[in-house]
Amino acid sequence: MQLPSLTVVASGIFIAYIAHSVWTIGSLYFPPKCAEKKNCVFPYLKNQHSLQMLLFVTPTERNGTLFFHAFLAKKSQQWNSDEWTQALQDPTTSYAATVISVYQTPVQESFNLIRDKEYLEKEKKEKPVTHIYSKLVLNILDHKDSLPKKEIPPDIAQVLSYSPKGEYLPVVYIDLLGCRLADLVPVNQTMKDFPVELVYSPISFGKLRLWMQFSAAMHTLRQMGFTEKDIDELKGIFADTNIVLLCVTFIVAALHMLFDFLAFKNDIYFWRDRENMVGLSSRTLLWRAFSQFVIFLYLVDENTSLLVVIPAAIGTLIEVWKVTKAYRITLEWINGVPRLNFGQSANQEEAETEQYDSLSMKYLSYVLYPLCVGGAIYSLFYTSHRSWYSWGLQSMVNGVYAFGFLFMLPQLFVNYKLKSVAHLPWRAFMYKAFNTFIDDIFAFIITMPTAHRVACFRDDAVFLIYLYQRWLYPVDKKRMNEFGATGEENQQITEEDKKDK
């Protein structure tokens, strides 16, 4: 009995994971029904009470941390000190609170490195200051159905409070997913007042449970060492996206992970058993390794989400490993000292490929290098940067993004001269193509640098050219595929099988 392939196993796990996730999320939106009244807890809102929202901001005496308080109490026509106290102490009053001030270093601003030298010294002396959230999102659970006492979901049970009659009170929920880092505004001593935008909306039973689970997941990520920047990117996906689009995004993200895994797997399989570079551009591989490394550094410098950084890091390691295979680089130790050895072209076909590769790079260098140098000089004088390192990295990554597609052309040129694309790892290419189109969707959802967003669409055009070459050139049965077999061998085996029958 033949065992299933790794691709089949991974696809099966993916389908099971998606089905289980959809069922889990869907079940949140169906609250338990109460069949017997004696075992039910009824809502306080069902009696049509007139309620009023009371909002406070109080500082702590120790360090001045600001707390935001929200009370949902019975409506009163006149509020004096006694009525305030009675309302806050009333057992039918719902309550929620959260911290709205953060003590941190202000976000580093960009400036011109040539004209604003004094600003550089100012940035180095920047100290942490108090920031306050300029936007708060307040929700009230508007569920008015009875709930079974013994089947209340645990996440809802921990936020429910009850009136003296045993009715469950409306839940006041402060949506921390809606508090983004971009809403933090620094405060100084000259400010006499601080405007805060308060967004209020009712929230359904299912969405409240979903948001509470997301908040718990954020807390777990903090304990695992994720930065506030990474968590803020995830908040943006949850809070700024329609719930239907959020589900689609979840499925697309799972597909992206699956295709990433399959692309990496097939890419590794192809290069692990590769013994020559016939039909493959070694300079394109070298450029891809360099550009992947530069992009990885750029994404880290821009504090990009780990959803983008981690795949970039894995891709960089694979590209570097492919370069060692292409140039036959081996490491040996001589008297405790490491030494790199570089192999030579093994046959005439490989030498022919190297000749075409060198010729294409010669023509491209006439265009690429002046554009990169000119772009770096222009960026230095006319755009703002956070530091000299940021400028250098920005200049290199602009060259990679804006003109980097030119380094993909040598492989197209080699394909054109050889009139064949049979030497390319098409399985890995197809998975990467699917991921490229998925990246187009994520380009509008996940926060990333604009240059990285544009590069997603640039890769689409290059891959379409590869597909056109695959359609244009006939199948070369003499060339080996990624499994080391040729079309002639497969045809010969087929004919022998027919004779045996």
Image (cartoon, helix red, strand yellow):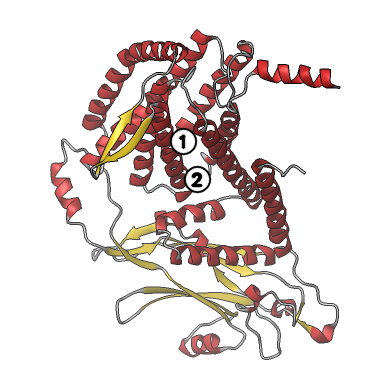
Q: Secondary structure at mark 2?
A: loop
Q: Residues within 10 Å of mark 1 (few under 14, many from 20)?
A: some
Which mark is on residue 17?
Answer: none
431 above or below 362?
below
The amino acid type of the residue labelled 2 equals Ile
Placement of the C terminus among the 4 image quadrants: top right
* Residue sitting nearer the eye, 192 or 46: 46
Residue 387, how many percent across, how many down?
Answer: 22, 43
Q: CA distance from mark 2 to mark 1?
A: 10 Å
Residue 57, how many percent across, how many down?
Answer: 41, 74
Which mark is on residue 446?
Answer: 2
* Point 65% across, 85% down: residue: 162
Q: Is residue 500 visible?
A: yes
Instruction: Please state if 141 lies on the left or on the right of 83 as rendered.
Output: right
* Point 38% across, 22% down: residue: 283
**Residue at the disc numbered 1:** 453
* Residue sitting nearer the eye, 458 or 152: 458
Residue 206, how many percent across, how many down?
Answer: 68, 64
Who comes first in sequence, dot 2 or dot 1? 2
Which quarter of the figure has residue 438?
top right
Q: Residues within 10 Å of mark 2 (few under 14, many from 20)?
A: some
* Point 60% across, 88% down: residue: 91
Which quarter of the figure has residue 355?
top left
Q: Secondary structure at mark 1?
A: helix
* Residue sitting nearer the eye, 335 or 469: 335
Residue 89, how many percent across, how many down?
Answer: 54, 89
236 above or below 65?
above
The amino acid type of the residue labelled 1 equals Arg
Which quarter of the figure has residue 65?
bottom left
* Point 67% across, 48% down: residue: 14
Placement of the N terminus among the 4 image quadrants: top right
